[in-house]
Structure formats: structure tokens, C-alpha cells
Amino acid sequence: MYKSVSAEEALKIVKSNDKIYIQAAAAVPSVLIQALTNRHEELRNVEICQLHTEGDAPYANPDYAESFHVNSFFIGRNVRHTLKAGNGSYTPVFLSEVPLLFKRNIVDVKVALIHVSVPDVHGYCSLGVSVEATLAAIDNADHVIAQVNKQMPRTFGDGIIHISEIDAFVEVDEPLPAFSISEPTSIETKIGDYVAELIEDRSTLQMGIGNIPNAVLSRLHNHKDLGLHTEMFSDGVIDLILKDVINGNYKGINPGRALATFLMGSQRLYDYVDDNPFVEMRTSDYVNDVSIIKQNPKMVAINSAIEVDVTGQVCADSIGSKMYSGVGGQMDFIRGASLSEGGKAIIALPSATKHGLSRIVPALKPGAGVVTTRAHIHYVVTEYGVANLYGKTIKQRVKALVEIAHPDHRESIDKSYFGMM
């Protein structure tokens, strides 16, 4: 059906000055990446474009700066050091618009490195656990190299491609990167309680990965007829689906199906989504499209932040001027949920850092990015309660946010803000 080659042979197609896109998250094609990195002595000025990827990123080694430059559309931990070291850059972009960078030839991708399931009898492979912008990269790249993995789940939705679209095949048999989540702390559990109280039956959920989303999900077992329309999900939703708490029956878009654009979790998650028609993997310009999201009644978007100022400005991508992550899909879903009939847009975060610094602040740090503006913000939740800022004046917002700040900081936040006026 197809002829496989070694990773070394497949990667010979890459030339100096090429732009390369790497499939994201747990679908990162690690064997292809290592083969590419091994060519660092002969390649120069290769730009590697990517969203968050799991596992090692050997090409991000500053020692290879002449060979590879990392262009992150969302900054993961494995490449965060490149911005300071000088062998990496960050391109701010909504997750919903990343495919447009390729479709409009703003980023001229020459080679797409992808990770797929074994082809079926008709010659179709699945992009498995990550679709995001990969289809757009495939459609616009000159060459497509696929890591074909017996352990890649076969998922339904947009990520089905025929072998005729692939130029080289490299066979592997290895598990996907697994992501484990620790038990929520007492603070995270309290936040989960408050958020769960905001979620009504027949709501559709968007949430990410981590202890706070898991704490929320653990409190939803008595809810009914929930839906899932989210850029990603992890293990926390599986039991809710099995118990028919999440069934998608009242979604406005793709009812009876759970929508995501990428997945990360344990082997249990990967086994669960394999050949499971309840889960649809769609492109990020569909899943994160505000006009699509808002069609789900009672859409609930649950996102986090690095800090929130008392007027409602949300910084979620940087610590001051130091870039930390990215814009991602927060604004896509905050806006979509806000426009949904009965929808709720929620920012959930602990009131203070592990070092005791307040995350509710009089003003954002100098250089901090505003991912969600004060005009878009609705609910802010900490372990001290819920502040509903929608339709509130600045003074009313300050009062509401001070009330859910850590008690050790409330007086100083209040005085500092009004002292700046």
C-alpha cells in the first residue's frame, strides 16, 4: 500500500532556509524530529514552526542556533528558553487563526512533519490526537513526511488523510507522550466547587488540562446532559461520558458528539478515543471559531490566568514582558461563551502564587500582555469566591475583585489602585 523509509532518508528532503511545521501536543513526531536534529551540522536557518509540543525538543538547543530557529505560536516549556537564548521567537496569534497563517501563505511552510495512525484498507490515515493547524500545513506544504505509528489512536472528524497526500512514510511502534495530573490541592478543590456551582444542566463545556479543570470535573457527577466543545480535553471527562453526564444531547453544534482539536492525557485517554465516534477531532479554525462556539446554548468557557488587574484585564501569556505561553484559544472561547444564550465566560485562578504574591493586582506588571480585555471579562473565580464583572463599573469591579483576593493583600490592593488614580 505504501513504502516506508528510514527517518534519515525521509528527512533528506529538508534544505537550509526551509520552514517546517511540526504536529502539536501529544502527536509530536519525535522520531522525525530527532532525525532532523541529527542534520544540524549540514543545515542552516531552518525555521521550525509549532504550537505546544510534548516531550523533548532537541532542535531547540541553543548550540544549534545557526541550524534551527523556533517560531512558537504557543510557547511550551520545552522551547521557552529559546526566547532568551536568541534561537527562538514568539508569534502572537489566536488558535482559531493559526491555520490562516498557512492558508494565506503568511508562513510559507515547505515541509510538514506529521504523526498518523496506520492506514486502513482504503488507504486513509488518522491524525489521531491532534488536528489543530496540521491539515492547513499539509495542504500548503511542498512535502509531507509522516511518522506512521501502530499506537496512534484512530479518531473521527477532520483529521483523516489519504496516503496519496503523504510523500514519505516512517514506521514506528511507540507509545504517545502521557500526561499525568496530580491530586488537586485544597485551594484548587475550592475553586472547583465555585466553578461547578456556576455550571447548569445542559451546559456545554470548554476547559483545558490541569488541576483546576479536573477539580471542576470531579464536582459534576450529579449534573445532567452536559456537552463538550473544547480545544482540548484530558482524562477527567471520561468517567462523566461513561456515566452519561456528558452526552452532548443539547449542544447547538454537533449534538451528540464531543468536539476537540487536540488531546493530551494518559494511555487510558488514548485507548478511549481510539475508533470512538463520540469524539470528533476538528481543525482549530472550526472548534475555536467564535461564530461556531456561540451556537451552543449555555456555553461555559473555563480558562486561567497569570494575573488579573482590578479593572478586569487578564494577563495569561506573559510574566511582565517575559513571554511564558501564548494567546492560545482563551479569547476565542471567552468571546464565544459570552455571546452564547445563557453562556458563561470564567477565569479561574488561585488568589496568590506559591510564593504568596497576589494574582489579583492593582495593575498588571509593566510589559504584561492583555489576552482578555476588561470589556470581555465576565466571571473571575478564586478560592475566596466568585466575582461577576459583566456590566459593572470600574469601582464596582475593584470592590468585587478585592473581595475574592487573598485576605493578606486586600487592603493593599484597594489602596494601591485608588492611590494611582
Image: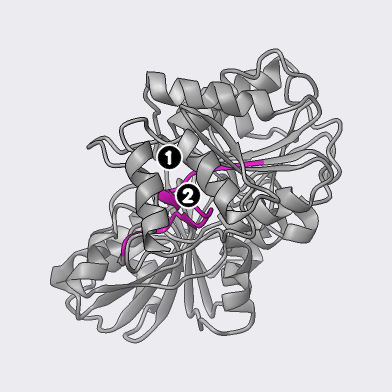
What segment carries the magenta color?
301-320
Q: In front: 121, or 375? A: 375
In the displayed structure image, the side of residue 318 where residue 103 appears, left or right = right
Q: In front: 215, or 230? A: 215
- Residue 152 in view in this figure: no
Residue 302 colored magenta?
yes
Tag 2 near tag 1, CB within 8 Å: yes
Q: Residue at x 23, y 72 (%)?
A: 39
Residue 115 x %, y %: 49, 54
Amino acid under disc 1: Leu
Residue 129 x %, y %: 56, 45
Q: Is residue 369 above or below residue 220?
A: below
Residue 354 x %, y %: 26, 35
Point out which mark residue 27 bears: 2
Point out which mark residue 176 bears: 1
In the displayed structure image, the side of residue 290 where residue 6 appears, left or right = left
Q: In front: 369, or 311? A: 311
Amino acid under disc 2: Ala
Residue 256 x %, y %: 83, 34
Name the quadrant of the N terminus.
Answer: bottom right
